[in-house]
Image (spheres, helix red, strand yellow):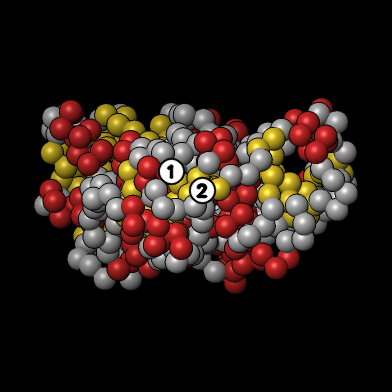
Amino acid sequence: MDVIVIDTPQLGDRSYLVHDGAVALVIDPQRDTDRVEQAAREAGVAITHVAETHIHNDYVTGGLELAKAHGASYLVNAADPVKFERTPITDGETVQVGAFTVKAVATPGHTHTHLSFIVEDGDKQAVFSGGSLLYGSVGRTDLVAASDTVGLTRDQYASVRRLVEQADRDAALFPTHGFGSFCSSGPATGADESTIGEQLTANHALTDPDEEHFVHELIANLTAYPSYYAHMGPSNTQGPGAADLSVPESVDPAELNRRLEDGEWVVDLRNRVAFSSSHLKGSVSFEYGDGSSFTTFLGWVLPWDEKLTLVGSLEDVENAIRDLSRIGIDSPDAAVGTEPHALAPDAALASYPRVGWDGLLSGRAEGDAVLDVRRTDEFAGSRVAGAVNVPLHELLGRMDEVPDGRLWVHCASGYRAGVAASLLQRAGRDVVQIDATFEEAETSGVPMDKSTLQAAD
């Protein structure tokens, strides 16, 4: 048995190709299945089975289309009310895939119908735990419904214990979440690998002997999660179609100018430094960069299911189209190019100041406001003295709460501040982007308030 990890760092998730040298099982594939197929070709194996640990909350699955393309059995919990044909599987049921055996283990908690899979090949065992047992923690339990959170947290506590009881101590553990995904909770370590035995001594869900304490602590530490999650479950239950990863013909200058004038969403993928210095007036900044923040924040911040026009280099546009397809944002338009004036010669250009913390200290005038666009839990821990907190993901809906006058906008790293500054300028506000880490504020001499506040996400 060989396990090939297919990492999606943009969403903090992993998919897996498990094979015996001839046939393969794919677990929790992302929607862009060409990566899985390439891994299978390179390994020289045929995909005969595809399995889902759960109806995913944070991405659109590629499982159904992958199974169709390869004539593979699609293993989905019999209790899931899906609208497509699948091979139903239940707790304790086993499936033979080539030389190895796959056993389903009910592990409710992240969802009510969550399954984990224990794969055995002779004396070798691997556990694929989805959003159940993660490295150092467990999957969050508040994504189904607020009224179900306490019950699911209790289920999660019991499930991980049941799972480790059925697995060998030296079994390798392969979770889907826990690598930056908002589907993880608690102190997930972000480690690259682990075993069941290691988790028995290091995972708070297994080391905490008090279920009530575990439930209270896990729920208390849950923070806000992307609003687009609400659309993932219904899409995955219905059965999503294949992703279209092609780059459309570039929007012509006159049409791009019209979209800007009409207030449509034109998304500039260039780095936030370039955007602040010159951009098409009315466009918004979602720097693509390495992709680590792009998908989550665009899907979280912009209104769902409105037409997007992506502006940037061909490479960034290609990457952005792929990444957005993973959360069900399909077929955005594009204007390929990195010179704003060349893309729409008749469109107005805009800019705004970009500074560090020293710029705030030297340039802020009386009456100017500091706007902190971090999450409320981040703001509650420590903040610039006198700062106003409107989290980025709430900004469009709370523009009337933003103070009047010039706004000095910051976050934790500069990324969210860049997005917020562009949204505020688009709304006609006078902005300065503070492009510096929050950790540098105090050492730069910025007055701070470290009193603990009650966070409410």
Q: Where is residue 167 in the image (x, y as percent from the top left)?
A: 42, 39
Q: Which quadrant holds the N terminus?
A: top left
Instruction: Give residue 48's quadrant in the image.
Output: top left
On residue 340, the disc is 1
Name the one closer to the observer, 234 or 49: 234
**CB under 8 Å between callouts 1 and 2?**
yes
From the viewer's perspective, tell me whether residue 3 is left or right of residue 184. left
Image location of residue 242, percent across then percent down: 22, 55
**Residue at left 63%, top 60%?**
428
Dot 1: few (<14), some (14–19), or many (≥20) neighbours within 10 Å?
A: many
Amino acid at the residue labelled 2? Leu
Q: Name the residue under label 2.
A: 349
Above or below, comparing residue 49 to residue 438 in the picture: below
Q: Is residue 269 left or right of residue 252?
A: right
Q: Which kind of residue does numbered mark 1 sit on?
A: Pro
Of label 1 and label 2, which has the lower sequence position?
1
- Nearest the viewer among 108 and 348 is 348
Q: Vertically, is 442 above or below 422?
A: above
